[in-house]
Amino acid sequence: ELILFVPIGAGFLTYYLKIGLLEDSPVQNPEKLYKEAGFVVYVGLSTLLFLLLMFSEIPFLYELFNVDPAIIPPLWNFGGK
């Protein structure tokens, strides 16, 4: 399921790089990074999505990638058994 997070993670790195290339960038002083509201929202939503995907099971993906599901049962199951 974490394969679905790859574009979001890449977007996170891209957003951070974009902020880093600004004049007088808040990335130079990470303690001021919270002032970038859009970045903070993106980090929060990315974290929630990561946790959701980490503890869920999407049976369609196992069929698509032709892999066996994990033995440990997931907390949530979307679209299946």
Image: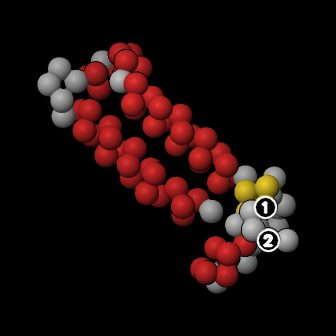
Q: Sort mark 2 into few (<14), some (14-19) or many (20+) by Cα contacts within 10 Å.
A: few
Residue 73, x across and y down, in percent: 84, 61
Coloration of the structure image: secondary structure
The residue lying at 59 percent from left, 48 percent from top is 50
C-alpha separation, residue under disc 2 versus residue under disc 1: 7 Å
The residue lying at 53 percent from left, 34 percent from top is 44
Image quadrant containing the N terminus: bottom right
User: To which quarter of the image does residue 79 belong?
Assistant: bottom right
56 is higher (above) or lower (below) than 46: below
Check if mark 2's residue and mark 1's residue have beta carbons within 8 Å.
Answer: yes
Which element type, helix, strand or loop, lies under badge 1? Answer: strand
Can you name the residue that lies furthest to the left here? Answer: 23
The residue singled out by tag 1 in the image is 77
29 is higher (above) or lower (below) than 13: above
* In this rendering, position of residue 45 left or right of residue 70: left
The residue singled out by tag 2 in the image is 80
57 is higher (above) or lower (below) than 75: below
